[in-house]
Image: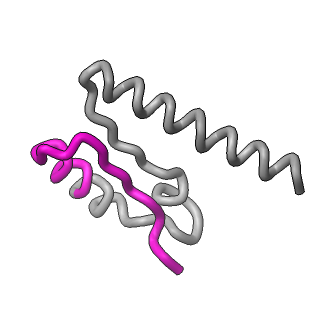
Amino acid sequence: MEFWRLKIEGNIARDARTRQGLLDQGWRVMEVWECALKGKQRRPLDDILAACADWLVSNQQVGQIRGQAE
């Protein structure tokens, strides 16, 4: 159990550093979670594409698409 806790915490910290590094370089960041693309929580592809298109024309620096709530 400890292994997985440390692994997940490490992944979260790494993702935050990577996101901040990209923002610091002037990039905008859209995160699409794997669960949004496949599995029980996946979203319809048209919904994902629409959310990405909306974000692209927005002024938001960070966007995120997660899987659907069960």
Report x, y in % for residue 42: 48, 65
Instruction: Specify start and end residues of the magenta stretch as a single range.
Output: 51-70
Report x, y in % for residue 33: 49, 51
Q: Residue 65 in magenta?
A: yes
Q: Nearer the viewer, residue 27 or 37?
A: 27
> Is 61 placed left or right of 59 in the picture?
right
Give me the residue at 50% from left, 30% from top: 17
Can you say which quadrant of the picture contains the N terminus?
Answer: bottom right
Q: Nearer the viewer, residue 50 or 10?
A: 10
Give me the residue at 27% from left, 26% from top: 27
Give me the residue at 53% from left, 51% from top: 34
Whether 44 is drawn above or below 31: the answer is below
Quarter of the rendering containing residue 11: top right
Give me the residue at 87% from left, 46% from top: 3
Q: Nearer the viewer, residue 62 or 66?
A: 62
Q: Residue 68 in magenta?
A: yes
> Is 40 placed left or right of 66 in the picture?
right
Instruction: Give the tally of numbered discs.
Output: 0
Report x, y in % for residue 55: 20, 49
How was the colour assigned to the protein in this rendering? one colour
> Is 65 placed left or right of 42 in the picture?
left
Residue at the farthest bottom position: 70
